[in-house]
Image (cartoon, rainbow, N blue to C red):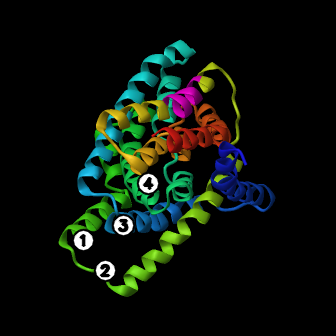
Amino acid sequence: MNPLLQISYEIILPIFLLIGIGYLVQKRLGLDSKTLTRLNFWIFVPAFLFTGILHSTIKNDELLKVFLHFALLFATQFALAWFLAPLFGASDRMRRALTSSVLFYNSGNYGVPAARLAFGGLGESLQAMIIMMQNISNFSIGIALHAGGREGSNWRQTLKAIFHLPMIYTLITAWVWRLSGAPVPKPLDEALTWLRQGLVPIALVTLGAQMASLKSHRLGLPLFGALFLRLCIGPALGWLYVLLLGFKGELAQAVVVSASFPTAVNSALLAMEYDNEPDFAASVVFYSTLASAVTVSVVIYLAKNFL
């Protein structure tokens, strides 16, 4: 089988099969998407993050480079999206929604299974770090972007949103535990392992249900601009910074692939919460997820063969 088709068959197709199940069940029976999202956000992702940090095979100096890579990628994509948005015909509010759609990608629901299938435990450990940074930035800078210019929005609300995140407390606890070297009690470790294993199916079915609930699919130049910046420029910049920071081997490949994932549903949810171009934001999530079946396959192929 052609190597690119094999990647699509073995890595991307299983992901889309579970997304499809969630989509069809939502259309046919109607799932409680809010409850599914809360299960992911408050139970499965924190368990995944905790065990990912505690049992990560990535060395501490490599983790620092991962954080630096994320910061460089985030800053560059922010600048590109913000300054190119007017060229795509975006108004001020659309500019904010477009920038958010480019910055915040689906490192959890989509990224975890893709990384697991492509890179095994290393990919999972990396995604735990990316999920943490994505959520913190999404519920700080993301809120500031969507709420910008609205009367009554202020930094106190943003700060409150950040400290409402379970990931903050999970992060602190996991790193203190890791640095202490203390063993995790067997019953707790077993329970967290079960939760960690449950993340992938629940997350993908949730993503499918969320996509089925997105109401509007709006085409136009801003949409195509957002898709290009997220799915093409994102991994290209990820590759550039991997080379500049001196990543090597499979970790370099996994870092590049992590920058290629489609727009996160959280971006659309914030747009709906702050009534900031919600139709556009929903459309970017929908079409970027569909297009990623091709683009993520290509990025995985290129990373595995040329990095």
According to the picture, the residue beneath numbered tag 2 turns out to be: 184
- Ranked by sequence position, the earlier of labels 4 and 3 is 3
User: Disc 4 and disc 3: Cα gap in Å?
Assistant: 12 Å
Q: Estimate the spatial distance between the alpha carbons at disc 1 and disc 4, rounded to whole Å.
A: 20 Å
Of the two numbered discs 4 and 2 on the same chain, state the one appearing first in sequence.
4
Query: Residue 282 placed where, x, y %?
Result: 62, 38
Residue in the picture at 33% in, 58% down: 58
Q: Is residue 92 visible?
A: yes
> Is 283 on the left-hand or right-hand side of 67?
right
Q: Which residues are magenta?
A: 225-233
Count of number-bearing discs: 4
Measured along the vertical axis of the image, is residue 213 above or below residue 227? below
Quadrant including the C terminus? top left
Q: Would you say residue 226 sits in the magenta stretch?
A: yes
The kind of secondary structure element at disc 3 is helix
Amino acid residing under circle 2: Val
Residue under label 3: 50
List the residue tagged with mark 1.
Answer: 177
Disc 2 is placed on an element classified as loop
Residue 127, disc: 4
Cα distance in 3D space between marks 3 and 1: 10 Å
**Amino acid at the residue labelled 4:** Gln
Instruction: Tell me the residue at 37%/56% (across/down).
Output: 165
Q: Label 3 is placed on what type of residue?
A: Phe
Queried whether the magenta region covers residue 207, the answer comes back as no
Task: Give residue 207's position: percent from left, percent from top.
Answer: 62, 53
